[in-house]
Image: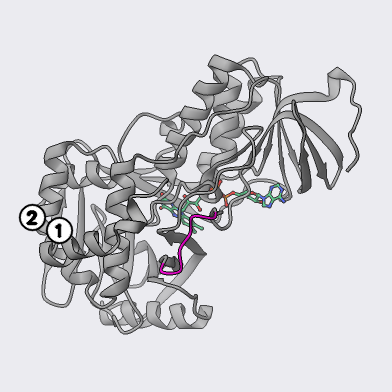
Amino acid sequence: MGAVRVPASDLVDVLVAGAGAAGLSLAARLARQTSLRVTVIDPRDGPSDDRTFCFFRGRAHPFEAAIARRYATVEVRDARRVVRASLDTRPYEELPGLAFAELALAQIGASDRVRVRWGVSLRTFVERADRVEVDASDGTHVARILVDARGGRTLTHTAETADEVRWLQHFVGHVVRTERPIFEPSVATLMDFDVSQEDGPHFVYVLPTGPHEALVEDTYFSSARFSRAHYEANLQAWLSTRGARAHEVLRREQGAIPMTTAPQARAASGRVVVIGQRGGAAKASSGYAFQFIQRQCDALTAWLREHGAGRAVAYLPPRSRVATFFDRVMLSYLHDHPTQAPQVFVPLFASVPGDALARFLSEEGTALDHARVMAAVPMAGVLSQALRTTHLWTRSR
Ligand SMILES: Cc1cc2nc3c(=O)[nH]c(=O)nc-3n(C[C@H](O)[C@H](O)[C@H](O)COP(=O)(O)OP(=O)(O)OC[C@H]3O[C@@H](n4cnc5c(N)ncnc54)[C@H](O)[C@@H]3O)c2cc1C
């Protein structure tokens, strides 16, 4: 694109590409906390009911009013035992994707400076010294800052090495209604490892909403997805072993979230800021992203409040070096011992108090929480992995 001349009235401060979890989380904050002019674009024709966000309660965020359910008990299990953890201060919270989007859009709608344009997609962009020119499906947009929240895979930069772990957390989930009451509504099953471990870490995730109803997800950590039929056959088998001979599928969801040791991309200049899953928000060792997206959006909003959109944005790393260390060591350990996931996670939940584990997994852990987790994992194996993978976790994030 040649340089585009635009009247000042057409220049926005921030153009957000993507109205998913990250784009809407940021736009809602910018609407309430800044006076910046913001446009959000997204090729869809509106928000969709295609995912459920769950996370341990952590720092406050603007979407708490849409939380549908809180579990004070979570469990992990394998063929031999069931381990339950009580969450007194950090319940496991469920935020339906559509309710989140509707609340975010209501918050955005209260501002006349922030608008969302559905049915518009970003095609390419050119960074200039003081702005970014974006070629979109409805024409050219010019913004001081482009926020790339298009989801999809994590971008990586050149420090990547050949022995990088490049896994996905891939899953198919069904919201089912069973004829017989087989679910315990107050307990979320984070990982049921009582399924084949032949293809790497594999578990069923169960989020009950009643004795007859739950979201049930067949989940793997590995490098490639299977056909939909593969996960669905696993779900069918899991349900029938639990006594649900007849069931109805009310809703389906699926996903493939990056789990990688590769360092996070930094855009060429601070005029383009990458957030959300594409910007490294997904936690490498678990695939959870929602609460880390909230943190990224808090940090970017705080930057823009303080500095405005006139200056290039400083690099805002998605997580601390300590969290990056634990993620890279844990992920490379699982990668090298792919059938050992139950031996890592079940003892972890058995010996670390629930709230401490929730803090650790939310990257809000204390030094004592970290020490408890270290004491609960297969120490010799994890230490040797830490030494073997020094080159993965000592470099730049
Ligand atoms: C089914 C599912 C369940 C999940 N459950 C959890 C969970 O329980 N807990 C958790 O922490 N994380 C969960 N995640 C992971 C993560 O939180 C979500 O993937 C989250 O939606 C990522 O946010 P995002 O904004 O980066 O991407 P998305 O929410 O996917 O949004 C990306 C947006 O960009 C738009 N877009 C694409 N191309 C363009 C373009 N060219 N121009 C403009 N816009 C574009 C898309 O239409 C989309 O709206 C889940 C993911 C999935 C898929």
User: Magenta segment range?
Assistant: 158-163
CB-based contact (under 8 Å), mark 2 and mark 1: yes
Q: Is residue 103 left or right of residue 203?
A: right
Quadrant of the frame with the N terminus: top right
Q: Magenta stretch: residue 95 in it?
A: no
Q: Position of residue 313 (x, y in %)?
A: 58, 28
Mark 1: amino acid: Leu
Please tell me in which quadrant of the rendered image residue 161 appears: bottom left
Of the pair 306 and 170, the residue shown nearer to us: 306
Disc 2 crowd rating (10 Å Cα; few below 14, some 14-19, many 20+) is: some
Q: Is residue 305 left or right of residue 19?
A: left
Look at 52% across and 45% down and name the residue there.
Answer: 276
Which residue position holds label 1?
348
Which residue position holds label 2?
351
Q: Position of residue 70 (x, y in %)?
A: 30, 43
Of the pair 68 and 24, the residue shown nearer to us: 24
Q: Is residue 181 visible?
A: no
Residue 143 sits above or below residue 327 on the image: above
Q: Position of residue 155 (x, y in %)?
A: 56, 54
The residue tagged with tag 1: helix, strand or loop? helix
Q: Is residue 306 left or right of residue 201?
A: right
Look at 50% across and 33% down and name the residue there.
Answer: 297
Q: Position of residue 128 (x, y in %)?
A: 77, 33
